[in-house]
Image: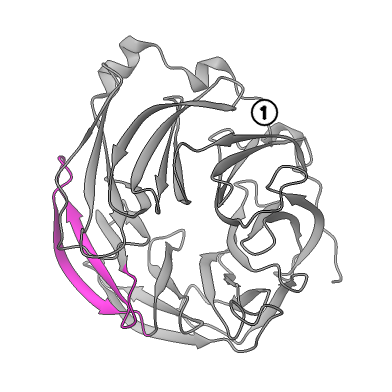
Amino acid sequence: MSGTSKGVDRRLFLAAGAATMAMPMAARAALGDLVYYIGTMGAAGVSTLTYSPAYDQWKLGKADPSVPNASFGVYSPKFKRHYILNEQDAGTVGVYQANSSGKVSKKGEVSTQGKSPCYVSLDATESYLAVANYGSGNIVVYTLDKSGLPTNPVVKQNSGTGKDPERQEGPHAHCVKWSPDQKFIYSTDLGTDEVIAWPFDAATGAVGDKVVAFKCEPGFGPRHLLIHPSGQVAYLVGELANAVVTLRPNADGTFIGTQWTSTLPEGYTDHSQAAHIALNRDGNLLYVSNRGHNSIATFYLDGTGRLGASQITPCGGDWPRFFTVIPGFDRIIIGNQKSGDVTIMKLHSDGTLSGTVTSLKVDQPVFVGSIA
């Protein structure tokens, strides 16, 4: 693709220090408990997970079946609302409010206009909500009303196939999020090996026609897209290729691929599927989960945003579909779908992982969200 991108400011990739990763116990105690919710597939619903920093203890709450198939969610501080997907053929997004203990109450629910919704995100102003429907290969963009309820759905349908006849027989939208300048909505399509840029008008909520922002190699299977907070580099994880492509943005909303990096150890040939991708708080370490190899890969970012040396650590369970890093508390929470457990591992001051600190039984955990 044509165009160039700015170099990455080296100051954006500061080395993580021990002060960031390991907060003194007295300071931890002063912050009070942290409450998360664990989304699960099936009828079990969501469970609360409470962390007591003062005692470094975890407590799993009773499951709430009123929020089924909670495959993904996003929180709006503006409206104090959680938007949680119900991943089923007739997909829905529920609007919930949670109290300090994590108990949720439903405030509304709308159709996602598609099948098997798997990703939801908010724009920077929290005025719009977007959902990716994996099963039907479309995205839907809502305007949020003054109460934070989704209205005026705009549906954009993709089409096409890919190299893999079983996984890429049609379009499969897997991630959706806004560009930093709010001019595009990006969606990844696992079925067609594309990152799509949909032109977006933040003033009216209008969504334009499809622009291919990046065409992956055949069979890559793009799953999640992560845009660095600097806006100058992005990372695309391929579920089928078990790899990360480093991307440079162009002014027209497209990307240039600059680096291809495997998420698996050299020589590993058994089945695996890359899943979630996230940065640490300082933006200089990238984490990717491997389902099958059952590990978390940690990559160091250099001053240009390129991925450097990696560490690959067993996740303590089977099929790590999702994880979340707890900033400042040297812990990472991992949802292992097939083994039915949530593992909490230790993050060292250099960002590497080791040892399972705690393991809690949860039926088919697939998402971890913060209550606030």
Q: Position of residue 171 (x, y in %)?
A: 57, 83
Q: Is residue 41 above or below residue 135?
A: above
Q: Nearer the viewer, residue 237 or 19?
A: 237
How would you rate the neighbour count of disc 1 (Cα within 10 Å): few for under 14, some for 14-19, many for 20 or more? some
Q: Position of residue 64 (x, y in %)?
A: 15, 55
Q: Quadrant of the N terminus?
A: bottom right
Residue drawn at (46%, 84%) of the image: 136
Q: Quadrant of the C terminus?
A: top left
Residue drawn at (42%, 68%) of the image: 118
In screen coordinates, is 310 left or right of 125? right
Report if residue 91 lies within the magenta region: yes
Q: Nearer the viewer, residue 228 or 335?
A: 335
Q: Amino acid at mark 1?
A: Leu
Residue at image mark 1: 14
Q: Which residues are magenta?
A: 86-113
Q: Position of residue 238 (x, y in %)?
A: 65, 61
Element at badge 1? loop
Q: Is residue 303 above or below residue 107?
A: above
Q: Nearer the viewer, residue 241 or 140?
A: 241
Q: Position of residue 285 (x, y in %)?
A: 63, 36
In screen coordinates, is 313 left or right of 340? right
